[in-house]
Image: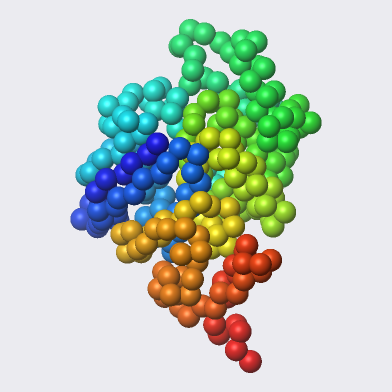
């Protein structure tokens, strides 16, 4: 579904991404893991066509994104940021309906079919009961689910989430990531950046790690969430212990485990 080949990007003379290559299959959930400033968000911006000055290529569903106008790009991929702020008192239903604009001509307003798709998307992420609420009055987790519903209305099959649980409490983190994983099982291709190795381990099919602007390693969760990789990635000694029959791994700095 997505193939990134030899992608490099610099801010002025400072190289941020260096020869990045990887692919993501249809229906796969890929997590991108790395420390602050390593280039995760820059990678996303390049893949979304928002930073066109990169070298290399990003191919989405067989098409180089450089050849895609914004409207065509929006039909293929949807972006879910860390947080969304609305300066107007839009209802949840109105916020989600905005996702339908990618498929409409400039002179056409959303009609009955778009309204029905909004209700379908809200039901799918479990917040149909909030459709008439003011978006700004929702909790952080509810807002993220509303933005996820907006992406579904956009009808893109690739969903790119930039630290989607960064500002959420534990319950809302689990709520959002569980819904996202279910979407991947239904055929959506998911790419998320995260700072949480445990989330990456539990929800992902594969994990891509970045260090110093380069691909450090990529593999299955049980291959990546190990002391050697996580310790090198974050430049600290860590201990990783399994929970629930190794379905979840907990990463702990070694100095916290010493008495």
Q: Left of 214 or right of it: where is 242?
A: right
Foreground residue among 83 and 47: 47
Residue 215's quadrant in the figure? bottom left
Q: Whole-percent x and y of residue 37?
A: 39, 60
Question: How many numbered tags mark residues here?
Answer: 0
256 left or right, relative to 192:
right
Give the quarter of the figure containing the N terminus: top left
Q: Residue at x 72, y 29 (%)?
A: 123
Q: In this view, which residue lies farthest toward the right?
A: 129
Q: Is residue 212 left or right of residue 192?
A: left
Q: Can you say whether 14 is above or below 83 in the image?
A: below
Q: Position of residue 105 (x, y in %)?
A: 46, 11
Residue name at image x 30 percent, y 50 percent? 21
- Residue that protrudes farthest toward the top in the picture: 107
Q: Is residue 43 visible?
A: yes
If the image is split into quadrants, where does the C terminus sit?
Answer: bottom right
**Residue 99, x across and y down, in percent:** 55, 25
Image location (x, y in percent) of residue 87: 60, 34
Whether residue 87 is visible: no
Which residue appears at 22% of the width and 44% of the height? 55
Tell me the quarter of the picture where residue 234 sits.
bottom left
């Amino acid at each position: 579904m997505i193939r990134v080949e030899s992608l490099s990007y610099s801010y002025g003379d400072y190289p941020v991404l260096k020869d990045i290559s990887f692919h993501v299959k249809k229906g796969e959930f890929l997590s991108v893991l790395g420390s602050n400033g390593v280039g995760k968000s820059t990678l996303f911006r390049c893949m979304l066509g928002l930073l066109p000055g990169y070298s290399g290529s990003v191919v989405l569903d067989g098409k180089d994104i450089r050849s895609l106008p914004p409207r065509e790009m929006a039909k293929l991929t949807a972006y879910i940021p860390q947080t969304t702020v609305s300066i107007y008192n839009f209802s949840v239903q109105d916020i989600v309906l905005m996702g339908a604009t990618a498929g409409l001509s400039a002179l056409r307003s959303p009609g009955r079919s778009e309204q029905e798709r909004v209700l379908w998307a809200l039901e799918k992420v479990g917040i149909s009961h909030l459709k008439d609420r003011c978006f700004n009055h929702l909790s952080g987790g509810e807002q993220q689910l509303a933005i996820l519903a907006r992406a579904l209305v956009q009808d893109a099959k690739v969903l790119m989430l930039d630290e989607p649980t960064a500002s959420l409490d534990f319950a809302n983190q689990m709520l959002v990531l569980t819904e996202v994983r279910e979407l991947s099982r239904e055929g959506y291709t998911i790419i998320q950046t995260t700072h949480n190795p445990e989330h990456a381990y539990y929800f992902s099919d594969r994990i891509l790690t970045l260090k110093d602007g380069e691909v450090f390693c990529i593999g299955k969760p049980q291959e990546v969430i190990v002391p050697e990789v996580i310790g090198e990635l974050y430049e600290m000694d860590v201990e990783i212990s399994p929970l629930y029959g190794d379905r979840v791994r907990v990463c702990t700095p070694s100095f916290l485990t010493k008495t």
